[in-house]
Amino acid sequence: MEPKPAANRALLGLLLAAGGLALLYLLAPILTPFLLAAALAYLCDPLVDRLEARKLPRSLGTSLVLLGLVLIFVLLALVLAPLVQAEARLLMNQLPQALEWVQQTLLPWLKDSLGVDIMQDHTQFSDWLKAQLGQGQQLTAYLPQLREGGLAVLGFLTNLVLVPVVTFYLLRDWDHILTNLAAWLPKPIAAKTIAIAREVDTVLAEFVRGQVAVILVMAVFYSLGLWLVGLDYALAVGLVAGVLVFVPYLGVIVGVLLGSLAGLMKHGELAALIPVWAVFGLGQLLEGMVITPRLVGERVGLHPVAVIFALMAFGQLFGFFGVLLAIPASAVLLVGLRHLKQQLD
């Protein structure tokens, strides 16, 4: 008996999917700049479309949008650089005091309370460092690390040039790329697939807008809260923690570390860090239970309780990346279920 055409098409589809996944795995090391460029093109396409609707050529609109992004990053750097420089200078001025506190308070406390005996004077550390850099540690031993570091810097510079170039071409031809992809779809499923893709696009756009709102709210909350408890570096620490809040746990971890360091340099006592930790604890609680469900969940059509459950469920199943993708993945899944229900009805 000859295989049925439907079975042949299914087998061909599986083979193509397997081949595509294998190719993605092999090309993973070089995909990062292209994926980043595709994400930027996707986010900037609505702006270029609006400029194009005002009779502006697509290439010129793309150039203006990308130039605007560059200017925003430059302005942020110009605004934040003096702040970071000033606070770094204060940090260096207080460093001897912090080292003295570590020597006289923290290390003895660790030894007495936890039994952790760490070298407590500079001579021990100096002797250890000299031993590491002594006769057995020639310069040639560090050449592999230097080479790897040089390659990493070269890769970063390459991506720094490649991402804007790829973004420009993708953004300029975005509509044509989508049209060509749609043309490859089989006719029986083309209309339905395009409708689902458009709805997913709307949901993801709302997710991005909601996430930006969460970042702004948390940056203000952390900065104001740390200022109220008397932290010297409240603005810088709050901004960093707020901007990093889109990555699960990273914002609060970095914020707690920076806030604790700043608090120790000012007060020299662990008890003085309790208000700082309280600010981040309250912020993490509000962000996970109230702010994200409200500002993101409702935008993408998810009930606040569904958002909390999705974050916990995806985190349990897929760990860190599960928490990162929980809300957009749940929203996309909801779109698919809605269309499936319509088809069954």
Image (spheres, rainbow, N blue to C red):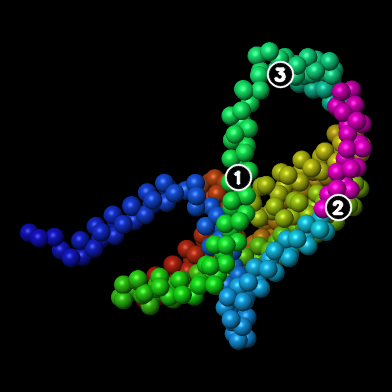
Q: Nearer the viewer, residue 185 or 337?
A: 185
Q: Nearer the viewer, residue 163 or 345?
A: 163
Q: Is residue 164 above or below residue 129?
A: below
Q: Quadrant of residue 11?
A: bottom left
Quadrant where the N terminus sits is: bottom left
Which numbered circle lies on residue 154?
1
Bin the neighbour count of mark 1 within 10 Å (Cα to Cα): few under 14, some 14-19, many 20 and up.
few
Circle 3 residue:
133
Q: Residue at x 59, y 35 (%)?
A: 148
**Gap between marks 2 and 3, in whole Å?**
36 Å
Q: Left of 3 or right of it: where is 30?
A: right
Q: Amino acid at mark 2?
A: Leu
**Gap between marks 3 and 1, in whole Å?**
27 Å
Q: Left of 18 or right of it: where is 91?
A: right
> x, y percentage for residue 339?
42, 72
Mark 3 and mark 2 in contact (Cβ < 8 Å)?
no
* Residue 72 visible in the displayed image: yes
Q: Amino acid at mark 1?
A: Leu
Which numbered circle lies on residue 83?
2
Residue 90 lies in the magenta stretch: yes
Q: Main secondary structure of the magenta part?
A: helix
Q: Name the mark nearer the viewer: 1 or 2.
A: 1
Q: Name the mark nearer the viewer: 2 or 3.
A: 3
